[in-house]
Amino acid sequence: MRLGIVSDTHDDLEAVEAAVGTFEREDCDAVVHCGDIVAPFSATPFDAEFEFHAVRGNNDGEWALAETVDDFGTYHGETAELTFDGRAFVVYHGTSGTVVDALVECGRYDYVLHGHTHEFAREKRSGTVRINPGGIPFEGAPGPHYAVVLDTDSGKFERHALSEGIE
């Protein structure tokens, strides 16, 4: 199975549309958004030919976001426990680094997916793979915004740049 992972799109429709295009080209079966979609209008492009899951980010205060996502996917709230290809995933925005570390180290999950820092990360600790796809560039965190495509069967992943970033 091919799983698309994105986070912290912050109403950047150009990045959202690039992510959706990437996930469609890469034939993703499901997509997970790790939070900070922000407004409902920037969630609607994810209404595509893949299963869609999203969690709440610290900037997702718009009351209609959950309702909008639930029209075509699943809005899980603060965290989501998902299973793809028999592998256990937990998705959390990442607002607390302590919580991210606890999720990685607890031994319950094969993958911990999160965002929040806007910095790409992939590491394996205690048998769990932690992936942060990054987020839209902002001052202090220059670089492209990425989407990640994970092959859940092999564990291989690819990063796809969605924007050029701030110089």
Image (cartoon, rainbow, N blue to C red):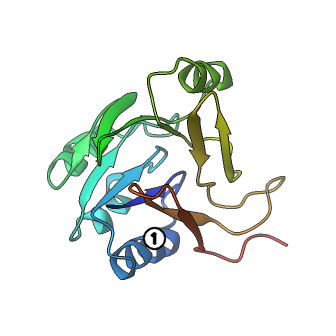
Q: Is residue 72 above or below residue 167?
A: above
Q: Residue sitting at 52 percent across and 52 percent down?
A: 7
Outermost residue, left side: 71
Most foreground residue, 38 or 127? 127
Tell me the residue at 47%/36% (across/down).
110
Q: Residue at x 50, y 75 (%)?
A: 14
Crowding at mark 1 (Cα within 10 Å: few <14, some 14-19, many 20+) = many
Element class at badge 1: helix
The image shows residue 25, relative to residue 157, as above or below, that is below
Residue marked by disc 1: 19
**Percent from the top left, x then y, of residue 130?**
59, 40
Number of callouts: 1
Q: In the figure, residue 46 lies in which quadrant? A: bottom left
Q: Is residue 142 left or right of residue 157?
A: right
Q: Quadrant of the N terminus?
A: bottom left
* Spot occupied by residue 33 in the image (x, y as percentages of width and height): 42, 50
The part of the image, by quadrant, that contains residue 94 is top right
Residue 79, percent from left and from top: 39, 29
Front-most of 167 and 161?
Answer: 161
Compared across the picture, whether 47 is left or right of 118 comes to left
Q: Position of residue 13 (x, y in %)?
A: 46, 70
Residue type, mark 1 in image: Ala
- Seen from the viewer's position, the closer of residues 137 and 87 is 87
Query: Farthest residue in the bottom direction?
Result: 25
